[in-house]
Amino acid sequence: MAINEYNKQVKVYTLDRKLIKNATLIKQGDDNVTLAFHKTSRDEIKQLLENDVVQNEVILLMTHNIKGMCYFHAESTNIYSGNAPREVNVVFSSLQKLETIQRRQDVKVKAHNIKINLALSFRGMKEVTAELIDISAGGIMFTCPSEMLMEKEIVIYHFKSAKANFDVKARILRIQDLKRQTKDGEEEIRCYGCCFEDIKPNEEYSIREFVLYLQREEILKERERQDY
């Protein structure tokens, strides 16, 4: 099970969905995660888990920028002291996905002839120019004819708008070939669908503003076409 595309903030519930505590994702494996519980103690966390009616079985709510909110059944298998004062780390294993609730509020809009700059972190931060295909608050799709990229590869998207300019990390989740119309007919392009990772609240806000701007522009263009 690939879980390395999930955000760092995690909620831990009992099996009947009562919140135990909020946590931070600090380590990920094939079928396990390590969460950090802040401003607490090892005994407090152990007591929370052992004295609960579900014993060491919990529900983890992890949020994926594209897939949405995902619930996992898990078992706590190890508890140890964290790096910071009053921080405790808990390893949860045997993860099984229960359900996914899609983030419907993340509107995806098409981009037309928008050039973007990327840095390829797997390739010595090589700088390349790409073309944005679509964008949402959760991720982007782009085409990059000069490179052959791979799934799970990390790219650094140099986001730039009229109001903000920053770098955001994006992981390639899927690769697909699309056809689009050109002046001379039709062409096939290779596209890379990515989700944003470790995005800060102010960065997400700026991207949402940019998405809304593109949405308004598309509506205005459609009205002009209809009037014409």
Image (cartoon, rainbow, N blue to C red):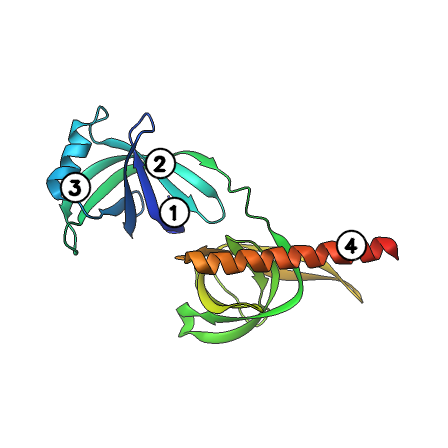
Contact between labelled residues 1 and 3, with CB atoms less than 8 Å apart: no
What residue occupies the far right of the structure in this picture?
A: 228
- Please tell me whether residue 9 is drawn above or below residue 184 in the rendered image: above
In the picture, the disc for residue 72 is 2
Q: Nearer the viewer, mark 3 or mark 4?
A: 4
Q: Nearer the viewer, mark 4 or mark 2?
A: 4
> According to the image, label 1 marks what residue?
2
Contact between labelled residues 2 and 4, with CB atoms less than 8 Å apart: no
Q: Position of residue 35 (x, y in %)?
A: 25, 46
> According to the image, label 4 marks what residue?
222
Residue in the image at 25% along x and 40% along y: 92
Mark 3 and mark 1: Cα distance apart in space: 21 Å
Determine which quarter of the picture holds residue 23.
top left
Q: Nearer the viewer, mark 1 or mark 4?
A: 4
Contact between labelled residues 2 and 3, with CB atoms less than 8 Å apart: no
Mark 3 surroundings within 10 Å by alpha-carbon count, few (fewer than 14), some (14 through 19), many (20 or more): few
Mark 2 surroundings within 10 Å by alpha-carbon count, few (fewer than 14), some (14 through 19), many (20 or more): some
Contact between labelled residues 4 and 3, with CB atoms less than 8 Å apart: no
- Dot placed on the residue nearer the N-terminal end, 3 or 1: 1
Secondary element under disc 4, as helix, strand or loop, is helix
| Amino acid type at mark 3 | Asn
Secondary element under disc 2, as helix, strand or loop, is strand
| Amino acid type at mark 1 | Ala
- Dot placed on the residue nearer the N-terminal end, 3 or 4: 3
> According to the image, label 3 marks what residue?
78
Mark 2 and mark 1: Cα distance apart in space: 13 Å
Q: Position of residue 108 (x, y in %)?
A: 60, 51
Determine whether, in the image, residue 183 is placed left or right of residue 96. right
- Dot placed on the residue nearer the N-terminal end, 2 or 1: 1
- Dot placed on the residue nearer the N-terminal end, 1 or 4: 1
| Amino acid type at mark 4 | Glu
